Amino acid sequence: MQTLQEYKCPCCGGAIAFDSTLQKMKCPFCDTEFDMETLAGYDAGLQEEKDNMEWNTSAGSRWQDGESDGLRSYVCKSCGGEIVGDANTAATSCPFCGNPVVMMEQFTGTLKPDLVIPFKLDKKAAKTGLQKHLTGKRLLPKIFKDQNHIDEIKGVYVPFWLFDTDADASVRYRTTKVRVWEDDDYKYTETSYFLVRRGGNIGFEHVPVDGSGKMPDDLMESIEPYDFADAVDFKTAYLAGYLADKYDVDASKSVERANARVKKSTEEAFASTVQGYDSVITENSSIRLHNGKAMYAMYPVWLLNTTWNGNKYTFAMNGQTGKFVGDLPVDKKAAARLRFILTVALGAATYGIAWLLHIIGIL
């Protein structure tokens, strides 16, 4: 039998969850608040509780081979309702009574997170973030903003691998300086070419790579950065009231993406020191990484889904900083009008310049 962990209020017995505004556990029934340290021993105590209820039924038919792969079934201790999740769902809420639960069985056989950044922004902030995201978009269909309804909004703790490493770099650039002058008869252009080298060491800390195969990497990277100063030691109580995924992409499989991010950042950092030239082209780059190590963390993300004209749109908001991203539909008629206006404006400007040059005798 799968094990659920619910956090009950010691005062009234109601289900308690982590409140991102208070940064504490709070009971919605009696408004009692609990510091995280107060509940530090709660995990072990709850896991010792025994649930002797057994169900026996002959209803239904047997799953065929492979049909139930990846599904996990749980029984809510508060109402007896069944909760079904996939193989990576580690925290959710009961669809019948709404009680937040942490699926402890999902953590067995896997690594325990080292750190967690708790949610600082609530669901209301996520809805506000979507409205701000829609504001000022001239090519957004008006009906999308006026009649669009959110299909789903959920706070999710996403598993991340955080990589620390040092990078030794040696980079060679081909650069140019261009000098232009003229006399009464001719206009001159002189191009000088230079070979520029840069070398040194740069350190990286907490380079994030999401460990969930369900989360698009580009979406997760778009809501960065997170402020690591808010990271705390992991406790399952932080997951109560939110969804959570355990990793299905382990650290070893995430190294390649971490290396690519480190290499790109190293090249950008060294290139920023090559100044005073009209063009800079990287000719050769050699980057060697060493002293690498990884940590396992859970980061807060708000996910919003909406459907319009048969297409699904997914938005994401950083649950700590409020950074909001997501693709939007384009009003094709409005885009065509804008292109027409720009074309006319450019044509008029070109005609005006030509006319002015003609007047002063250059053409």
Image (spheres, helix red, strand yellow):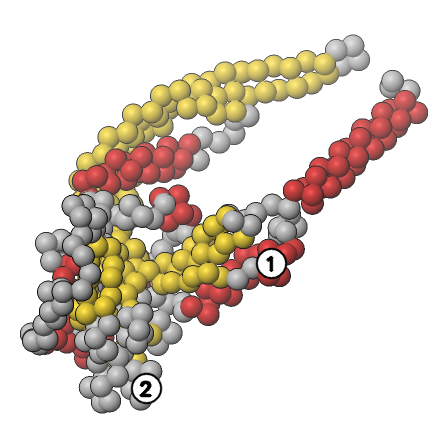
Residue 128, given in percent of the width and then of the height, sits at 51, 65
Residue kind at label 1, given as amino acid type:
Lys
The C terminus lies in which quarter of the figure?
A: top right
Q: Which mark is residue 145?
A: 1
Residue visible at 39% across and 60% down in the picture: 302
How far apart are the two marked residues, 1 and 2, measured between alpha carbons?
A: 36 Å
Query: At 36% from the left edge and 63% from the top edge, which residue is drawn?
Result: 155
Nearer-the-camera pick, 62 or 30: 62
Tell me the kind of residue under disc 2: Phe
Q: Mark on residue 267? A: none
Q: Position of residue 344 (x, y in %)?
A: 79, 35
Foreground pick, 212 / 269: 212
Of residue 170 and residue 7, the one placed in the foreground of this image is 7
Q: Residue furthest top?
A: 185
Badge 2 element = loop
- Above or below, 276 against 295 in this view is above
Give me the residue at 28% from left, 40% from top: 258
What percent of the width, then of the height, locates residue 264? 36, 35
Left or right: residue 18 compared with residue 136:
left
Q: Quadrant of residue 239?
A: bottom left
Q: Residue at x 19, y 70 (%)?
A: 75
Q: How many residues crowd mark 1 within 10 Å: few (<14), some (14–19), many (20+)? A: few
Q: Which residue is mark 2?
A: 29
Would you place residue 55 above or below residue 191 in this image? below
